[in-house]
Structure formats: structure tokens, C-alpha cells
Amino acid sequence: MVKICCLGAGYVGGPTMAIIALKCPAIEVVVVDISAARIAAWNSDQLPIYEPGLDEVVKSCRGKNLFFSSDVEKHVLEADIIFVSVNTPTKTRGLGAGKAADLTYWESAARMIADVSKSDKIVVEKSTVPVKTAEAIEKILTHNTKGINFQILSNPEFLAEGTAIQDLLNPDRVLIGGRQSPEGQKAVEALKAVYANWVPEDRIIATNLWSAELSKLAANAVLAQRISSVNAMSALCEATGADVTEVAYAVGKDSRIGPKFLNASVGFGGSCFQKDILNLIYICECNGLMEVANYWKGVIKINDYQKSRFVNRVVASMFNTVSGKKIAVLGFAFKKDTGDTRETPAIDVCKGLLGDKANISIYDPQVTEDQIQRDLSMNKFDWDHPPHLQPMSPSAIKQVSVVWDAYEATKDAHGVCILTEWDEFKTLDYQKIYDNMQKPAFIFDGRNIVDLEKLRKIGFIVYSIGKPLDPWVKDLPASA
Ligand code: NAD
Ligand code: UDX
């Protein structure tokens, strides 16, 4: 029986290994983590992450060929293939701070693998890493070798949260990069054989190591660039009376462009896009490619602009101040169908509103009060560390309350900001919400999910990203 061990029981390691276990009954899969609490949660009825369909997959395999354990060294020792899916945060100090990837967790994983191993291993980079990381990892592994052969593969993960199970079951492609040597190619074939249990052969792409590593950063950069492109257009739509949804539809109908990832929003969030683009920028700078670095910086600049533009709209529309006013925030996760709040635009929007002394009442169907309070207090990039190494919860911000119902959040509010596109926000009883709000009642839709005309008929003043402006908003100074 082939044995697989995965270091890192997070958003990638957990679901990916669960699908491998589901599709490969002849393989034993053990997911290990340095966070005992995370492992305990994976072994409980309350999994540590919310992902549609994940519970069912875990329940059907756990205890059969899928295990979660804190005994990291034992399972590394026994494994034939070791996936490394640990955190690769943005560095906050020293060389490359604010851009470069911090490979502390990866390096310590590699050193541990080198120390513990007594047989040949295939070590698979699942984490997103800077191009050429495999070379460094190889050095760490081979310098400690006791005659053991380590083959490093790059097998980046392309799943998106909220659809992780579907993405893993039916991936657009599986990318495997390896050394061009016979041993390297043998390792590539071994990993291919795992995926071939459910992924059609023509979707499994083999490349060299550096292409695989760089393709992951490139894919995320291009996806984020599409969003920044449409978000940049949304500002122009507001200035000219065009409708960004109509523009995006018309643009996406070009078969060379395609319709996906053209939804204007309050900004992209999530643990990957910003971090990976910063990482790409740093690599470009290290290679002296300043123009290329600046090109990608633009994607992040527009994203930051989009978030601050949204806050400015809210404040400017509400008579240039939200001080002491109740603002309801509907949705805090970075997208629907996940409880993940890493780099969610809601953090920046809420901080902006708090900066103008608003009182905020937040409702998200999947995010806890503790998480929201921590997110609003944490320093930039501090979120991307193993759970037990993250900063303790500071004292709660008094101007922020978290409630478990959209009607409670909006009661007596002066304004409502929709920051996540949860389906349930489309079907709320907006007449009831309007009746219970202060007047004039404002809605700022950061996800373009509400029916503008319907809400305007009820009496709301509505702002929706990239849509023709409400006369009320239109008459405000252009700086908004
Ligand atoms: P995560 O924070 O959810 O999980 C990482 C886990 O690794 C944590 O539980 C941590 O305790 C554990 N860990 C850290 N060092 C360890 C060690 N030495 N041994 C064992 N466990 C260790 O992160 P994630 O979202 O799963 O992301 C993991 C990697 O995958 C990152 O490089 C990320 O950029 C990449 N990635 C993430 C996504 C996504 O959607 N979240 C998608 C593709 C790629
Ligand atoms: C992303 C990549 O899609 C995935 O391939 C990679 O493995 C990890 O990073 P994820 O961050 O989970 O996945 O979600 P994604 O669906 O890409 O959304 C990222 C952010 O962009 C979200 O905040 C989302 O709301 C936003 N978005 C997405 C838009 O604003 N407009 C769009 O059209 C699409």
C-alpha cells in the first residue's frame, strides 16, 4: 500500500487529502499538523473549515484510509510521498518585508523530513512558493541525506475556496513539475498515477520544476488582474453612466476573453491573490525586472483603490460623516460559501468606517464574533501563521458588534453595506429592513447582488459598484 503523508491540515491540505483518500482506496493518507487543536477539530464532528461537501467526504473516509494526526515524525517516517502544504506567509520583517514569501515553515518542514527519513521519499510542494524554491529544498534535503534519495516535485493547488470539493473532483488541470533526470521523471510518473485514479490523463500536465512553480503565481496574478481590470472599469462606469455588468457581459462574450472572473466587486480578498502577487513582484525585483514588477503592482493598487473608493462613497453619501451612526455590514467572509476571512475586503472597509467613527453591526452566516474581532485588530499579514502562533485575541473593539441575523444587524441602522455575496442576502425582506432603519436609508452593495430598481422603489438610496449612480450619490463631489 502506498502511504501518503501531508504536512499542513489547512484549507488546502485537508480537502485535497480527503479527495485523494476518497478516490484512491488503496492509498493510506495521513494529514499531520503542528497545531494539535486543528488536528483535534479534523477528528471531531465540527471540522476546522467550512467547505460545501467536505463533511461528507471526510466522514466517508476518516478512520478507513484517511487519518489526521499530530504525530508528525512517525507519519513522515512511514510515508512514500510527502505533500508539504504549510503556510507561506508574506515576510513582515527584514529582507523583502511586505513582499517576499516567508519560507520559515517550509524550511523547518524540510529539515524535519531530512532528519526523520530512513527511506527514499518523494517530497511534493503543495504550498504556493517562489519559483526556484525546490532548489533550496533540495539542498536542505540532500545535505542531510544518509544515502536516501529525495525527489522534489512541484504540484501547485488551484482549488478555490467555497468550491474546493468540486474543483478537486474535476480539476481543469493538475500540474506536476519535476527534474528532467530519470529519477525525477519516475517521481513525476508516481504522482501522476495517484491523480490518474480520477483525473483524465490529458488534464495532467508535466513540466519542469520552475515552470510548475511559476505557473501557480502566474495563474493567480492573471485571475486577480481580470478583477482589477473590471474594477478599474467600474469607476469609469460610475463616472460616465455606463453599467459595469453590461460592459463585463459584452466584453466576456468575446470568446478570446470569456465570461469568468469579470464580476466587479468591492475588491478581491482571500489568502492567495495579494500574497502571491507580492511574491511575484519581489521575484521580478530580485531579477532586475522593475517594469514587470510595476505592472503587477498596479493590480494591487487598483484593489486598494476599490476598497477605499467604496468607503469614501459610504461616508460622502451619508452627509460626509458616519460618526456615531449605525452601519450594518452584511457579509464578512472574503467570498460566499466559506467562513474564511483572510484578506477579506470587509476588514479594510470596516477599518475605514471605524476610522470615521461609525458603529458597526456585522452579520455573516459563517464567521464568528471572535474571528471578526481578531481580524479587525490584527496587523497586516499576521493572519498567515499556524493557528497556535497567531496573536491572542485582544480586547474587543467596542464600536463593533456581531449578530446572528441580518434583520438584527440592520435594525435602526443608517446604512447597510453588503460585502459578501451570500445567496441569502438576495432574498432578504428589504421592505422590512427599510421599515426598521433610520431615514434616509442607504444601501451600499459591494457585490452587485441587489435589485436596484426594487430597492429604490421601496425608498432606499442605493449605491452599487459600477452602476449608474442614484441621483442622491451623483450630486456629491467627484472626489467620492
Ligand atoms: P492554512 O493556514 O489553512 O494551513 C497551513 C497549515 O500548516 C496550518 O494548519 C499550520 O499549522 C500547518 N503547519 C505549518 N508548519 C507546519 C509544519 N512544519 N508541519 C506541519 N504542519 C505545519 O493554509 P492553506 O490555506 O491551507 O495554504 C497552504 C498553502 O497552500 C499556502 O502556501 C497557500 O498559499 C497555498 N494555497 C492556498 C490555497 C487556498 O485557497 N487557501 C489555494 C492554493 C494554494
Ligand atoms: C483563488 C484562485 O481562484 C484559486 O485558483 C487559487 O488556488 C487560490 O486563490 P480563492 O481565493 O479561494 O481562489 O477564491 P476566488 O474565487 O478566486 O476569489 C478570490 C477573490 O476575488 C474573492 O474575494 C472574490 O469575491 C473575488 N472575485 C472573484 C471578484 O471580486 N470578482 C470575480 O469575478 C471573481
Image: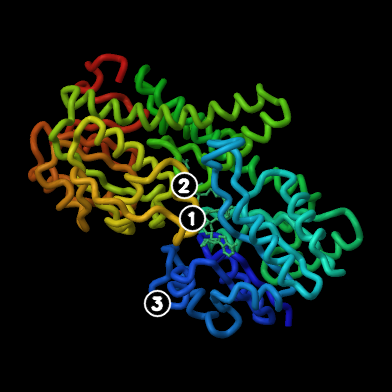
Viewport quadrant of the N terminus: bottom right
- Looking at marks 1 and 3 on the same chain, the residue that comes earlier in the sequence is marked by 3
Q: What element carries label 3?
A: loop
* Residue marked by disc 3: 45
Query: Which marked residue is nearer to the observer: mark 1 or mark 3?
Result: 3
Label 1 environment density (alpha carbons within 10 Å; few <14, some 14–19, many ≥20):
many
Q: How far apart are marks 3 and 2 (CA)?
A: 26 Å
User: Which residue is pictured at 37% across the width and 32% down the height?
Assistant: 307
Do labels 2 and 1 touch, CB within 8 Å?
yes
Q: Which residue is drawn at 78% across and 75% down?
A: 118
Quick check: is the Cβ at mark 2 less than 8 Å away from ligand 2?
Answer: yes
Q: Is residue 207 above or below residue 465?
A: below
Tell whether 349 sits left or right of 95.
left
Is label 2 in a helix, a strand or a loop?
A: loop
Three-letter amino acid code of the residue under disc 2: Gly
State the image coordinates of residue 161 (x, y, percent, origin top left).
Answer: 48, 55
Q: Residues within 10 Å of mark 3 (few under 14, many from 20)?
A: few
Question: Which residue in the structure is indicated by mark 2?
Answer: 270
- The residue shown at (30%, 20%) is 480
Q: Is label 2 or label 1 in front? A: 2
Instruction: Name the residue at 22% across, 16% down.
Output: 475
User: Does 55 sit above or below residue 211?
Assistant: below
Q: Nearer the viewer, residue 96 or 469?
A: 96
Q: Name the residue under label 1.
A: 161
Mark found first going from the N terminus, 2 or 1: 1
